[in-house]
Amino acid sequence: MALPAGARCWALPADGRAVHACPSARAAPEAANVGGHLCRDHGRARRGARPLGDGVLSSCVSVRPIFFGGTSEGAAASARRRTLVQCSEASSSSSAGLREGNSELFSTNSFTDGRWEAILSRLELVCKSSPETSLIEGRWVKLICGASFEDIADVRNLSLIYALAGVDCIDCAADSAIVAAVLEGINAAEQVLQTIGSGIARSFKKPWVMISINDDEDPHFRKAEFDSLECPTNCPRPCERVCPASAIKFQDSNQKASSNHLDGGVIVDRCYGCGRCLPICPLGLISAISYVRPLETVASLLRSEDVDAVEIHTRAGHLSSFRELVSQLGNAFSSLKLVAVSVPDLEELMIPTLNAMYTSMKPFVKNLNLWQLDGRPMSGDIGVGATRAAIMLAQKVVSSSERPPGFIQLAGGTNAHTATALKNVGLQRCITYENHGVSQQYEDNQSGSAVIAGVAYGGYARKIVDKFLRHVGEEETCGDVLVNRSSNQMEHYPHFLLHAVLEANVLVDSIKCSVNQNYPISTVPESHEHI
């Protein structure tokens, strides 16, 4: 779809139903009207723009909305900090250097650190098991990018890191651009292996790609919103400090002494709805906007060859909406390798609700099914105690003889202590495989009690590699400033990639348990001179 005359990029409203052309902010800053949202490079939006057409989905454009509130200066600063918008003049393939194999930053010589050999040896062992086998053996590990986390560059690099660490599945937002970013990260992992010259590239088992959807209002599917024009310059900005995703950014008020308000706002693509900012605002200015993705878009993704699995997020009181969602999307489940349902603790209704949901899904699920027990949603990065809720919920579910068939996987508060906690309560044991028709289930040989198939990591998985991701793309700019088209790809920073994978290995192996390794994790270099 060609850009209209005078437009430099596309902007996509949060409802995903129409796109608007964003003219050059430099030429006409007052005309950056993109339906109340911001193009990252072109300033604060004003409402009232005329859409170019109806029914145009995010897969048709290469630019995503960035801010709820803020000014052109704040948006431009964010653009210089992290470029996710693909400007029209920088729209050529971001991985050209990787494919051509002639990039000075990406070469065999870049991966001479001896610890890559240890990583490859470990990965070769991990890759002997397919994702399905990992489920059967209780070694399943899933990376949760976030149902609402839409930072394309970070999603790509997270997928690269954790694919090299050997995860079995990567869970992401139900958006074609995000799915494409996951696939690009997985393919980049394979390219890294080929560049190093490792034979493991031939046997590398790619992780499944999963998309997350919701049946109704759900905290995983919301975005924070506030108008920074209402924020006083003397505000201590607790929202900015508490955000685990660095999704709230303000321009330094000292740079604009004459202003009586803060410039900045929510970077929408990075906000994944944890809600920690909502109660902490001194003036109560922050609210949350919930959303449900269009079923037509979801169905199209499910039928594509890019998606292997789906996860439905549901909550207490949502049984009727769950049934309606399954009835509308069920026909698209037939080609999927796995259908998962994420459910929090429903207390005394837990087992009856699981059975009711299983009954509604059974006619449509042709392969595997899984129950994700969401102990303490979006809290794994907080601390040790965050994992307790998931462990307690798992104990309750697996102890019930009336629970429906399906693998059981932990999530919600999972972190470095989850594996040890599982072992301490006897939920990680030697297992055998039994076929239960539409689902697969396994049991402990000695007691006959069900055990856990694996663990999904979200906030904690992102947290432990964030210190390395922050060094990627620091010089990336857009608009009138020169763009280094490959600088936001982590494989072009082998030193940081190495240490990120080492960190990820420790977390993944806590569940995989197939390799006993103790890699030294060095500190992050002060600058890129060490790369």
Image (cartoon, helix red, strand yellow):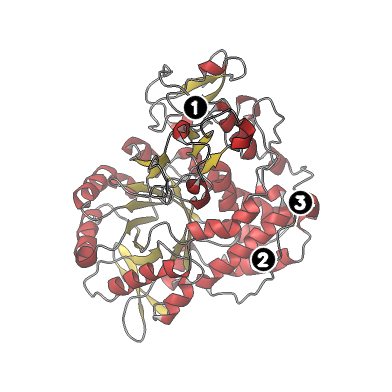
**Quick one: SS at disc 1?**
strand
Amino acid on which disc 2 is placed: Ile
- Tell me the crowding category of disc 1: few under 14, some 14 to 19, or many 20 or more residues within 10 angstroms, Cα based: many
Q: Which mark is residue 291?
A: none
Name the one closer to the observer, 522 or 19: 522
**Place of residue 92 in the rendered image (x, y in percent of width and height, measured from the top left):** 64, 31
- On the image, the x and y values in percent for residue 149 come to 47, 46
Q: CA distance from mark 2 to mark 1?
A: 41 Å
When the figure is inspected, residue 37 is found, relative to residue 362, above or below; the finding is above
Q: Secondary structure at mark 2?
A: helix
In the image, what residue occupies the spot 44% across and 33% down?
A: 230
Q: Give the foreground label among 2 and 1.
A: 1
How many circles with numbers are drawn on the protein? Answer: 3
Q: Is residue 58 above or below residue 496?
A: above
Q: Is residue 390 left or right of residue 492?
A: left
The residue that label 2 is drawn on is 119
- Camera sees residue 454: no
- Position of residue 9 relative to residue 408, above or below, is above
Kindly report the distance in space between the C-alpha atoms of the residues bearing marks 1 and 3: 34 Å
318 vs 273, nearest the viewer: 273
